[in-house]
Image (tube, rainbow, N blue to C red):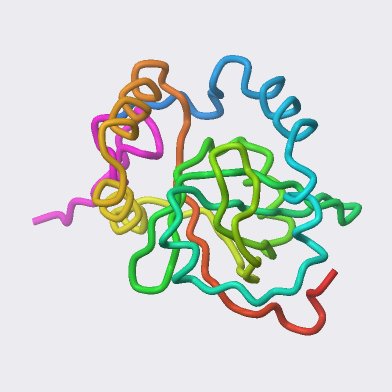
Amino acid sequence: MAETVPQEPKHGPDSLGARPRARPVPGRRLPAAIPSARLAARTAPHGARELADAQRTGSLAEIVRAKRTLVVTYRRDGTPVPTPVWAAEADGVLYVRTERASGKVKRLRRDPRMLIAPCTKLGRPLGAPLEASGRMLTGAQELPAEAALVSRYGFGRWLFERTMDVLRVDMGYLEITPGAWRDGEAS
């Protein structure tokens, strides 16, 4: 009897992940994603940009208590880019849902270093930052991320996810691991 090898369905990377009913189009972004990201970057509160120079004395407990988390990633030239996100914690790790083609994902692929801090919905920091590193998850790695986000956020997230599914936006999960950067990584 010949051994059968399971094949990946042809309808997208999330089909094997945490949201099997989602049918994203690879590379599809939310309409107006780039202009809105540029506007958000220009209008980010000054405290969000200054967070990169702040003392890194924050804690995961402070971040978990806040409804939103400020994720600061770095451009090639070292410029910090703040983004307020919904994040959920499980087993000492934070999870974030984002577009696979977003700027923060591109920056993290090049440099996994980031700062995280509690913030308001507009991105004003509510506490000291914490050093962390981030990476994109794939396939079955996404299951704990989805479970953590479902348990943390209610109707607003449900509505957001349904909208992304209808628009067939290519979404994925970031895993953010708090911890000090190694000496060679500091900017």
Q: Compared to 52, does 46 lie above or below?
A: above
Q: Residue furthest left?
A: 1
Q: Main secondary structure of the magenta part?
A: loop
Residue range corresponding to the magenta coloring: 1-21
Q: Residue furthest front?
A: 126
Picture quadrant of residue 34: top right
At x 61%, y 69%, the residue is 132
Looking at this view, is 76 or 49 the one in front?
49
> How far across and how far down the image is residue 76, in percent?
86, 52
Looking at the rendered structure, the number of numbered marks drawn on it comes to: 0
> How far across and how far down the image is residue 35, in percent?
71, 20
In reply to whether residue 8 is colored magenta, the answer given is yes
Q: Residue furthest right?
A: 77
Q: Is residue 114 left or right of residue 50?
A: left
Q: Is residue 118 left or right of residue 86?
A: right
In reply to whether residue 61 is colored magenta, the answer given is no
Q: Is residue 109 left or right of residue 94?
A: right
At x 31%, y 29%, the residue is 22
Q: Quadrant of the C terminus?
A: bottom right
Q: Compared to 31, does 154 lie above or below?
A: below
> How far across and how far down the image is residue 170, in percent?
47, 31
> How far across and how far down the image is residue 182, in percent?
72, 82
Q: Compared to 132, does 22 lie above or below?
A: above
Looking at this view, is 65 or 144 the one in front?
65
At x 70%, y 47%, the residue is 82
Q: Quadrant of the N terminus?
A: bottom left
At x 63%, y 16%, the residue is 32
Picture quadrant of residue 14: top left
